[in-house]
Image (spheres, rainbow, N blue to C red):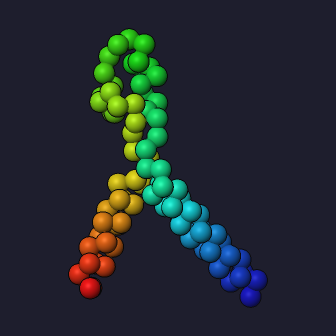
Amino acid sequence: MQVIETGLTAAAALLLSILGWSVFVYLSPYRRCRWCAAFGGLGLRCRRCKGTKLTRRLGARLVHKVKLSLRQAWEEQR
């Protein structure tokens, strides 16, 4: 019985951490480009951020697509 409770606790912790990460990425999808630090002093344009000094976080595109699909489903339901 304790093994099942431990498994459920681990699953709940995993789901909460995924939910927390998705909320964090939803609120701040961009981060500073770490590649610009290497190329910034040379005057070269970074290929990752294309000079904006910002790149998307891991999972930001997925969170954005989910947000758009939920919004579209909500509007279709009306």
- Split into 4 quadrants, where in the image is the C terminus? bottom left
- Name the residue at the right extreme: 2
Q: How many numbered marks are there?
A: 0
Say if residue 39 shows up in the picture. yes
- Name the residue at the left extreme: 76
* Nearer to us in this view, 35 or 26: 26
Corner quadrant of residue 30: top left
The reply, left or right, for residue 76 in relation to residue 24 is left
The reply, left or right, for residue 6 in relation to residue 49 is right
Say if residue 58 shows up in the picture. no
Corner quadrant of residue 49: top left
- In this view, 73 is above or below 16: below
Q: Residue at x 31, y 72 (%)?
A: 71
* Nearer to us in this view, 42 or 76: 76
- Name the residue at the front extreme: 78
Q: Position of residue 74 (x, y in %)?
A: 31, 79
Q: Residue at x 49, y 61 (%)?
A: 22
* Nearer to us in this view, 2 or 52: 52
- Name the residue at the top extreme: 42
Q: Which residue is drawn at 44% across and 20% down?
A: 38
Q: Which residue is drawn at 60% across and 74% down?
A: 11
Q: Where is residue 18 in the image (x, y as percent from the top left)?
A: 53, 64
- In this view, 35 is above or below 57: above
Q: Where is residue 69 in the image (x, y as percent from the top left)?
A: 29, 70
Q: Position of residue 57 (x, y in %)?
A: 44, 47
Corner quadrant of residue 1: bottom right
- In this view, 32 is above or below 21: above
